[in-house]
Image (cartoon, rainbow, N blue to C red):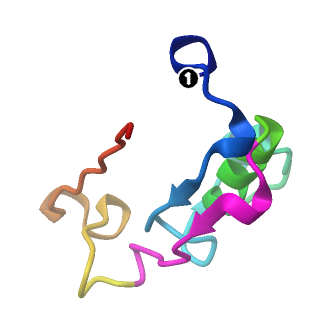
Amino acid sequence: MTSRWNTRPEDLHAAIGPGIGRCCFEVGPEVAVQFDKPQERTHIDLAAAIGRQLIGAGVSPKRIYTSEICTFCRADQFHSFRRDREKAGRMFSVIGVK
């Protein structure tokens, strides 16, 4: 974005929408090690990992908004392949440039 539109990271706002939460995202060691958690099994907080990447890229923590809604827990509102497997519906996200 910087090279194409001269965007400055400190001017950005970032929203992290609903996704599987730490409460439900248990992974094995082959995935955990990618998050610096070399354990047998552990829970991963994807929203926190994304937040760290955004901060590392220069986005202010005050401009990062997280929904903190777990799509696995909220079967009444969201599809989840991990929960429903082949019966799961599909969701999509949209990113826009103003």
Task: Characterize the local packing of mark 1: few (<14), some (14-19) or many (20 or more) Cα atoms within 10 angstroms.
Answer: few
Residue 58, located in which quarter of the rendered image? top right
Q: Residue furthest top?
A: 3
The x and y percentages for residue 66 are 58, 69
Q: Is residue 71 magenta?
A: yes
Residue positioned 28% across, 83% down in the render: 75
Inspect the magenta stretch and tell me whether residue 38 lies in it: no
Which part of the image, by quadrant, shows the N terminus? Answer: top right
Instruction: Write down the residue under mark 1.
Output: 1
Dot 1: what SS? Answer: loop
Where residue 4 appears, x then y in whole percent?
51, 13
Where residue 97 sits: x, y (%)? 38, 37
The magenta stretch is: 59-73
Q: Identify whether 4 is placed above or below 82.
A: above
Please state which of residues 98 and 72 is positioned toward the viewer in this rendering: 98
Q: Is residue 74 above or below residue 14?
A: below
Answer yes or no: is residue 42 visible.
no
Classify the position of the C terminus by image quarter. Answer: top left
